[in-house]
Amino acid sequence: MLISNLDHQPIYRYNVRMIKTYTHRHITWLDVEAPTIEDVNSLVKAYKLHPLVGEELLGPSKSSKAAAYKDYVYLVIAFPVRVRQDDHHIIEEKEVDFIIGKDFIITAHYEVVQPIHAFARAFEANSILDKEKTSEHAGHIFYYMMKRMYQHMSGNLDAIKSELVIAEDQIFAGKEKDTVEVLSNLSRELLDFRQTCRSHLEILESLEHLPSGFFDQTFGPYISDIKEEFIMVRDLISNNRELSTELRETNDSLLSTKQNETIKLLTVVTSVTFPLSLFVELFSMNTLNTPIVSQPYGFVIIVAVVFVVTLFAFMYFKKKKWL
């Protein structure tokens, strides 16, 4: 059954369309970028895919999923990819659909996914699977592809950690205000990273419960290795979030201390200047018989009183360690 009527399914149109086929021994890898209805119909027909899987391939899914069919496994996995935007980075969610059979694997994505392209270049150069003598089914291609994806994610997390270390130096260099936005952006990246990866472990664990004989018995350690790779990524996310939280708390504490010092100084100055201003204002009143003002040295006396009171006030505040 081909997909012919998908009025209820949103159609995604892209300027770039790319379909590439790779082979290794008897295994075929088909990488589909921005698949059209025609692409999906041909895949459904050639690999006897369920029509519901075909519908899923037409556009990004709302959530990750894993489904086992008789001759293949269908996985939808979202990967976080760090990209530059203006003067900071953001995390973009890149979905990749995997259809894994014994002798074929199909990957479908709806925009450029750099780690997939990097894997394709290495695959073309025969630098991956030729070293693996046991690569007798498509699960091994999935294994190496996931390893490449998690290595890319680890690289992004290492870059975030480096920026956190730089932010730490700026905090203790007196640049707390400049660091507030930096730490906020990095914290948001880590949050997006964690949210995008939240279902990975569940999906990988589902592969351990495939029917007996779907892949050979030696593939179990490969799945465990992928899980360990993801756990390392998850730990990196957790460690970076912990560091980010501690730096934000330290930065906020230093900012608060500086603000308190400024407010305290302004309070002290106000408490000194306001009474003296009132004192001087009393002698500026246009009344008869104003004391001191009418005397020959009235101005000097008033200035001297203001100076002495100010001096003693600041000495008192200094003694009380208010300054």
Image: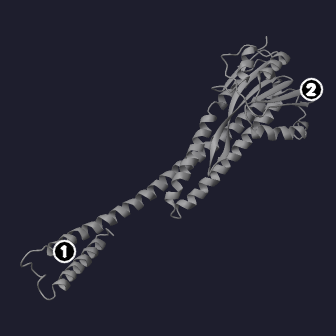
Quarter location, residue 317: bottom left
Q: SS class of the residue under badge 2?
A: loop
Q: SS class of the residue under badge 1?
A: helix
Q: Is residue 320 left or right of residue 119?
A: left
Q: Residue at x 81, y 41 (%)?
A: 118
Quarter location, residue 168: bottom right
For disc 1, the marked residue is: 280
* Residue 131 image offset from top left, x and y in percent: 90, 39
For disc 2, the marked residue is: 26
Query: Mark 2, residues whose alpha carbon is within 10 Å: few (<14), some, or many (≥20)?
Result: few
Residue found at the very far right of the displayed protein? 25
Q: Is residue 250 left or right of residue 33?
A: left
Residue found at the very far bottom of the displayed protein? 296
Q: Earlier in the sequence, mark 1 or mark 2?
A: 2
* Residue 231 image offset from top left, x and y in percent: 67, 38
Q: Residue at x 62, y 52 (%)?
A: 87
Q: Give amino acid for label 1.
A: Val
Q: Residue at x 32, y 69 (%)?
A: 321
Q: Give amino acid for label 2.
A: His
